Image: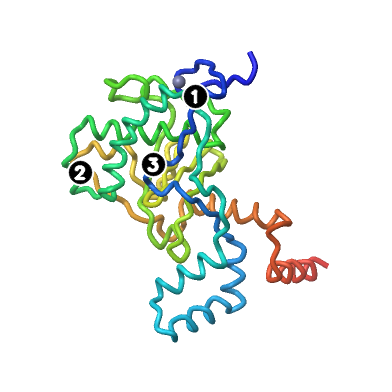
Amino acid sequence: MQNTNTCKLCGKHFANNEMSDEHYPAKSTGNNDIVRINLIKIVDMFQSGAMEKRVLEGLSTGKTFKEVSDEIFDRDLAEPLYPAGRTARTLCRDCNTFLGKYDEAYLKFFNADGEAKAIKGFQRNTKIQIIKSIFGKFLSVPEAADEQFDFIPFLRDKELDIYNGKWHLYFVKRDLSTDLLGLAEIETGKDQYDEGVVYELTDDKFIFDLMNFEKHECFEMNDIFGILDKDYQLITGVGNDGGYHAGMVIGRMLEQMADPNNLYEGVDENRDLQRRKDE
Ligand SMILES: [Zn+2]
């Protein structure tokens, strides 16, 4: 068979045109017109004082801080990456429709900002669907393409509300501690620890980490199954140590630095300094 794809949920083979383009994260959670933030340039603008100058100039013309930072973001820091949203051809049409039901539940969670007061009012079944929606999105995360997830039966069975596999799914709500200047970068990532692997998926409001070990105690995050509990409390931000998310951001920054297309004057200067130190 030529041009066949394996659906990540049902495991059957399909021709290319029988597959669907799955949005990860869901389209309605910020996944349209995705940009890449030039992390190197942000650091450079801060170090060179250009950021401060631009902000002060903007404020002096009567603009608000938000207007000025949005302007800097649009003009200098954001590069178009996925204008129509980020998708992967990972699911057949039937499975896409099937998981779409879970995504509707997730949208309720998203629109309620994950706030405990609202979530506690959801029916248990809705909460289970929210959990399954997020697990399901990791099937389309490119960094996890070769992973054999054991939660497929949990996702495929609408009635099943228990998962006892090896994967743990944690999340936090984004805030200024997760996003430099409040710039929420909707990215995916992968990080390797001594204990195992961490995959990350983010949307406009939340950061999700899927890992095959129990999270380090020092990183405060919600276990996704915690939304079922009466005493569920939403955790916001990643604290001073940055959690797993900081590792992902730093990893991307290093990747950008290693990419010759992303070299800027400031970085060149820093490299020269480094070289001089090494000599
Ligand atoms: Zn399928």
* Mark 1: C-beta under 8 Å from nearest atom of ligand 1: yes
Q: Select label 1 or label 3 by which is in front.
A: 1
Q: Which residue is mark 3?
A: 170
Q: Spot the residue most to the front.
A: 17
Separation of residues labelled 1 and 3 (CA atoms): 22 Å
Q: Nearer the viewer, residue 188 or 80?
A: 80
Quadrant housing the N terminus: top right
Which amino acid lies under the numbered mark 2 shown in the image of this protein? Asp
- Confirm or deny contact between disc 1 and disc 3 (CB under 8 A): no
Q: Which residue is mark 1?
A: 8
Q: Nearer the viewer, residue 58 or 171?
A: 58
Q: Which mark sits nearer the N-terminus, 1 or 2?
A: 1
Question: Does 233 sit left or right of 183 as displayed?
Answer: left
Q: Which mark sits nearer the N-terminus, 1 or 3?
A: 1
Please tell me in which quadrant of the rendered image residue 45 appears.
bottom right
Which amino acid lies under the numbered mark 3 shown in the image of this protein? Tyr
- Please determine whether, in this image, residue 117 is positioned above or below residue 104: below
Q: Which residue is mark 2?
A: 231
- Please determine whether, in this image, residue 70 is positioned above or below residue 123: below
Residue in the image at 45% along x and 38% along y: 23
Which amino acid lies under the numbered mark 1 shown in the image of this protein? Lys
Separation of residues labelled 1 and 2 (CA atoms): 34 Å
